[in-house]
Image: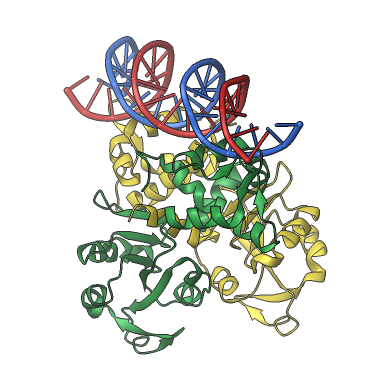
Chain colours: A yellow, B green, C blue, D red
Amino acid sequence: MAKENVPDVVIQRLPLYLRSLVHIAERGQKIVSSTELGAWVGVSSAQIRKDLSYFGEFGKQGLGYDVEFLIGQLRRILKSDQTWHMLIVGAGALGHAIANYRAFENWGFYLVAVFDNDPQKIGSPIGHLIIQPMEELAETIRKRHIEIGILAIPPQSAQAVADQLVAYGIRSLLNYAPINLVLPPGIHVAHIDPVVSLQSMAYYL
Amino acid sequence: MAKENVPDVVIQRLPLYLRSLVHIAERGQKIVSSTELGAWVGVSSAQIRKDLSYFGEFGKQGLGYDVEFLIGQLRRILKSDQTWHMLIVGAGALGHAIANYRAFENWGFYLVAVFDNDPQKIGSPIGHLIIQPMEELAETIRKRHIEIGILAIPPQSAQAVADQLVAYGIRSLLNYAPINLVLPPGIHVAHIDPVVSLQSMAYYL
DNA sequence: CTGTGTGAAGCTTTTCACAGCG
DNA sequence: CGCTGTGAAAAGCTTCACACAG
């Protein structure tokens, strides 16, 4: 399906291409060149052509790329054309904001369970779900076939909860806790830490 | 202050070093080697030594790095030892979660204003602030010396609001809207888009 | 002996530039 | 012609390996 070994950095750019392509499609545009897409995303045209060439030949020479076709190909490559089940641990302000975020389903990411260890919160509704106690983690992951965990908890407990999730079979983690998780090889983690982003930007101020 | 031209990728790693160093300091550890810090962060020891060498000689040969000293140096390099003023545009669920996030002040980032264009919301409290109308943007940015803008609005209006912020003098943007902003050179943008993170991870599933 | 700081080597990623096709 | 796809060249980044200092 995918070619040999594709650089990590390419995989991180494909979602950006996809996001801009959707935007271009919504404007009613049918065809796009690598130069134009590159201007939207902020990379060179050669970069885009080279990145796509890892996966096949999607363009028409002398013309460009069919926008809808390329969207479909990127969805397939990024596995956003199938269904994934996610859970959130942590039902604070952040957990609520994530649970009510409407953009996940479009891309095949379905939130199917939310957990918290606060007895006050357990049983309360959150979006269309009910907050569950941590004791039900293992069983819910197995029964609902959950592949992705989202951590929206304080940093003190993040490593321990991440270890639990991995022990119960989770292979991908989206970590909103401001701490670096140390996990076994084969587990994929993405960190979202606004302070880290701000600090990188502040360097240039 | 900073050496010649430091690669971007180095600047993006320094906040990760800082975050792990704080964690190490909280455990009461006084000295850390590049090998140990690398294990926490997930990079090689040579990488850490090389990255730090762009800015000076912070370690003691045969011993390692003084944790508190290195924290201080990284704070200085990343300009987290000074005060920055931020505003949020968008007072929805996400805007509220960000406004109530307690981790910014530790690093010198102070939220001083929140804006929304919904008349229903204007005047309501959010954290210790009051939601202001968009008409007050320009004046507030100037009077409060705001350098950083946070976008927590729907993607449809993100580009227009970003253009406004830049026109009024904002140089750094933290964008939570799932759209790629096209901005003039010299303006720094960091994107936080959980769908992009999830899509990159799903590739490996 | 331990662990930093750093040129040099090795590897990865990006850019170039052009053949080839619609 | 215009724009893709792609080897080859260039640039950038990481790792190696060792002199040196405590």
- Given residues B35 and B156, the one toward you in this image is B35
Left or right of B159, for residue B88? right
- Given residues B108 and A97, the one toward you in this image is B108
- Given residues A106 and B115, the one toward you in this image is B115
Residue B192 can be seen, yes or no: no
Q: Position of residue A190 (x, y in %)?
A: 58, 52
Task: Examine the rendered structure and indicate whether residue B122 appears above or below residue B75.
Answer: below
Quadrant of the rendering where the C terminus of chain A is positioned: bottom left
Left or right of A63, for residue A129? right
Q: Position of residue A110 (x, y in %)?
A: 61, 61
Q: Quadrant of residue C22?
A: top left
Residue A47 can be seen, yes or no: yes
Quadrant of the rendering where the N terminus of chain A is positioned: top right
Q: Quadrant of residue B84?
A: bottom left
State the residue at coordinates (34%, 38%). Answer: B4
Q: Position of residue B171 (x, y in %)?
A: 28, 59
State the residue at coordinates (80%, 58%). Answer: A142
Task: Examine the rendered structure and indicate whether residue A136 appears above or below residue A23.
Answer: below
Q: Quadrant of residue A178?
A: bottom right
- Given residues B65 and A90, the one toward you in this image is B65
Q: Position of residue D5 (x, y in %)?
A: 41, 23
Left or right of C1, for residue B69? left
State the residue at coordinates (29%, 62%). Answer: B162
State the residue at coordinates (35%, 45%). Answer: A41
Tag count:
0
Left or right of A164, for residue B111? left
